[in-house]
Amino acid sequence: MTWTQVYDPMGHWWLSTLIAALPIIVLLGLLGGLRVRPHLCAIAGASTAILVAILVFKMPALLAVSSFFYGSAFGLLKIVWIVIAAVFLYDISVDAGQFEIMKQSVAAITPDRRLQLLLVAFCFGAFIEGSAGFGAPVAIAGAFMIGLGFKPFQAAALNLIANTAPVAWGAIGTPVHTLAAVTALSESDLNAMIGRILPITAIIVPFWLVRAMVSWSETFEVLPAILVVGGSFAVTQWFWANHMDSNLVDIAAGVVSMIATLLFLRFWQPKKIWRFADEQAVTATEARDSVKHFSAGQIAKAWMPFAILSIFVLLWGLPSIKIAMNKATTPAFKTGGWEVPYLHKAVSRTQPVVAKPTPENAKFDFNWLTATGTGCFLAAIFAGVVLGLKPGKIFQIFGRTLVRLRFAIVAMTCMLGLGYITRYSGMDAVLGLAFTRTGWFFPFFGTFIGWLGVALTGSDTASNALFGGLQKITAQQLNLSPILMCATNSAGGVMGKMIDAQSICIATAATNQIGNEGSIFRFVFWHSVALAAIVGLIVMMYAYVFPQFIPSGLNFIH
């Protein structure tokens, strides 16, 4: 059975686009408008996608169902497993009593809630994004902030906003690797271009983050700290992306930003300590005296689980180790994975999405040992042993983690299933092609293609796989740089991260906000759109004003 995608099934591009958007309309409408639980929204969105694919796009039912299960399996191994393992590590830290020391160590640095927000949500969150990605920083940093005294709603919503600037290099640079593979463009050039777009937003996001919590005047009171946080992060992000590699951009930027901010706060503190309205007003001295102080050794032990996590993830990212483990544990490794029954090579993309008709691969590489989630899981077990927990206790904690994340697991699995239905049915291409009709403004609206991809799939990696090829072809047709527009897909996509159902579901599960998903979605939605628009303006400047700064001198503007 073979089938070729159709990109205008209704005979009118605007009507075809509207129908292709139905799964998204159902998903976001239920989530934001009717306040339905995310896992139910994801199930409804996926069901709508299957029906539209079969009834409107005339995709054979077997292929539609196969694409859903393929996406669900991919999501379980590549994304859900990472989130489960990262939250498991956090739960071990809490159960071993080390998380309290971590919280006190941050509270001892500064009692000001604005500065705590920058340290935990932005700096620490970026480090977790670089190590694990796929929603893990929202879960871990969000729970951390509640422990510090933030309201659960604030912890969830603010971490969603903070988890933007680092997303393009999440999980050891996975989105960039995928983008290079899909587009057949130079990874170093793509990495450098992303590293010339997002550092600008890395300066903006810390300011935006604090302003989302307090007033303008209270934001400017900590402007020096905001500039240190954003400036050190942006410079490191730019340097590493342009002169090093795509693997450690976030980890390096997060660590440098945190160290720079800690050093700065030893010499500077705001004149007025900002606390929540229901908290007692205190001076910096009073706040420091009220915090329990620990020795350097105790603090190092408390942060050790996350140091272990970074080591394991780095080892899991080394090609030599990954290849060796795959050869030993994955029988289909040499052939690129197992062919998905009925789906592999059965669906073909055609013009104008690809230059010539191309059968879509559908191979599942069940690399259970080299999966990033497995590295995180083993790091959690190792950390538990080092902290003195018995094996029975460790796996009891793991069981509790699974129960707590059960609805998030369903939501993430169905979201990836939905994403793969739109990919194999061609609905994603129809939505992307609608943006290509914007002509001269395509650099701006091309940003929203990536944004849409992440909002739809919950992953910058998946968005790059969906739309990377479309961005390249459209750029060539419009005499734009393919490097710029493909990098834009990833850079614009990061701003859609805060509104995707799986991230919101993870945030609510970690902060005990289940049932408030709709309120959180409405709070972050316009932040997401506005920040994506800022990225679009940056891309417009590169396209038409500063094309000489596009890597490799790929100047397509005449």
Image: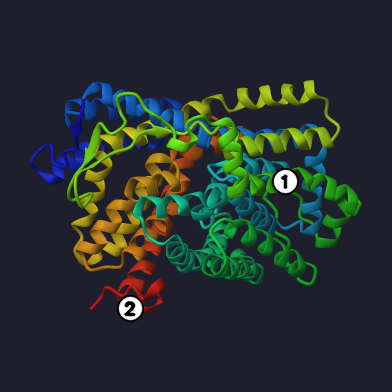
Q: Mark 2 packing: few (<14 Cα in 10 Å), some, or many (20+)?
A: few
Q: Is residue 226 left or right of residue 519?
A: right
First reached walking from the N terminus: tag 2 or tag 1: 1
Placement of 446 over or under 51, stated as above or below: below
Q: Is residue 78 left or right of residue 25?
A: right
Q: Quadrant of the C terminus?
A: bottom left
What element does badge 1 sit on? Answer: helix
Q: Position of residue 455 (x, y in %)?
A: 40, 44
What's under tag 1, amino acid-wise?
A: Phe
Q: Quadrant of residue 189?
A: bottom left
Residues 239 and 342: in front is: 342
Q: Quadrant of residue 421?
A: top left
Can residue 98 be seen in the rendering of this structure?
yes
What's under tag 2, amino acid-wise?
A: Val
The residue located at (34%, 30%) in the rendering is 45
Question: Which numbered dot is residue 354?
Answer: none
Q: Quadrant of the N terminus?
A: top left
The residue located at (51%, 52%) in the rendering is 167
Q: What residue is shown with label 2? A: 545
What's the coloring here?
rainbow
Question: Which numbered dot is residue 306?
Answer: 1
